[in-house]
Image (cartoon, grey):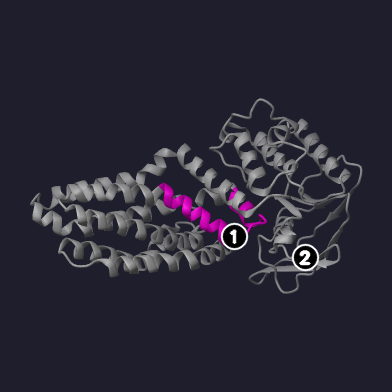
Amino acid sequence: MLRVESLSFQRGQVPILEKVSLELEAGEVLMVRGENGCGKTTLIRLLAGLIPAQPDFKVFLDDQPYHPQQVQTRLQFMYLGHALGIKDELTCLENLEFIARFLGGRSDISPLGSLQSCGLDGYQYTQARRLSAGQRKRLSLARFLLCPARIWLLDEPYSNLDAEGLTLVDRLLQKHINEGGGALITSHGTFIPQVTNHREMILEVA
Amino acid sequence: MQGHSLATAAFALLSRDLRLAFRRRGEALSPILFLLMVATLFPLGLSPDPEQLAAIAPGVIWVAALLSSLLALNQMFHADLRDGTLEQLIISPWPLPVMALVKVLAHWIISGLPLTVVAPVLGLGYGLDGATVKIMFWSLLLGTPTLSFIGAIGVALSVGLHRGGMFLALLVLPLFVPVLIFATAGISASAEGFAVGSHLYLLGALLALAVSTAPFAIAAGLRISIS
């Protein structure tokens, strides 16, 4: 589905990524593992189009060139970063209602439904700033249920979560790959995703 | 995403920003309080002579409005950068310049519109006549959105910087000057009984230029700041 061919990236003179190749198939979770500072976040942000691509950016989506700046491509992926993309002053439900209205949600699940699926039942009228770090992560993950993107780019989805939260991430990933989506996720830890189809790759420091 | 349109998304963003401003009322009110303080202190510091007050009113009120909208700029993209919603906005399927336009519009409704309503009242307090106060209102209505657009370009470029405040002021204040000159000249002309059309037309032209070009600059600035 998504193919990255020998992707390099430099910040100034400092190489961050050196000839990274990977292939993400439909219906699988690809876990990118590596120590701190090996460029996991840079890789994900490049694919999300948050960092402008350098000339040798050879990434293909369904064998077509992948341009994260183009509208058609942007409809295909969703991104979870270190900053969670939720507004503290809005309630949990308002946050998700905004996402659904802004991006055009799926018809099979409501914002409230996705909130309940992510274990935040009863928090719909709580302002997001009153949530714990793990609950905020759950709220940010609930966004992913609302939108029909095929590719999930998740940077450290397992951090900050309790045991139940970890199984929540697994459950969401499993649902996503069952529907034929693919997910690229990163981790600096040793946690292994409990999903039916998962591969790993190690990213070395450039 | 069937049946979903840019207009729906833009409206969702606008109403979210207005709701956020309502939740952070204290912060949203500070620019207007600043304007009131400055406008109240000038007569105390100079003299309460009505003729002198009427003479300085356009300048004092417009400078105060200008500085207060500079103060308000800090609310524009900083929180969005911190909580990651700016990233989500940039990678959303919608054209970023349009979303930038919506953000500036929301920001103007929160900060510029109250100035436009309150400042003419202050003008009455300074002893300006009705016709001049009306011109002051029009000059603010045409001028403050331009300030928001120009300011947004500066914020978009400086939002990722530590202590970007000084840089922001250096960047945008020179660009605010034409607006200030045409607005105050128009109000003074009205007070002296001259025609003011040309000044207001020029303010309108500046606004048209800002609306049509600034969103692209803001979008480009945000992309640079985020990467």
Q: In the picture provided, is B159 more to the left or to the right than A31? A: left
Q: Was residue A182 drawn as part of the magenta stretch in this picture?
A: no
**Residues in magenta, as a range:** B84-110
Where residue B207 sits, quadrant-wise, is bottom left
* Residue at 73 percent of width and 42 percent of height: A146
Where residue B191 sits, quadrant-wise, is bottom left
Q: Is residue A47 visible?
A: no
Query: Residue A128 placed where, x, y %?
Result: 59, 35
Q: Which mark is residue A50?
A: none
* Residue at 46 percent of width and 39 percent of height: B22
Q: In the picture provided, is B80 more to the left or to the right than A172? A: left
The residue that mark 2 highlights is A66
Type of residue at label 2? Tyr
Identify the element where label 2 is drawn.
loop
Residues flagged by tags 2 and 1 on a common chain? no
Q: In the picture provided, is A110 more to the left or to the right than B172? A: right
Query: Residue B134 placed where, x, y %?
Result: 25, 54
The residue that mark 1 highlights is B96
The alpha-carbon separation of the residues under discs 2 and 1 comes to: 19 Å
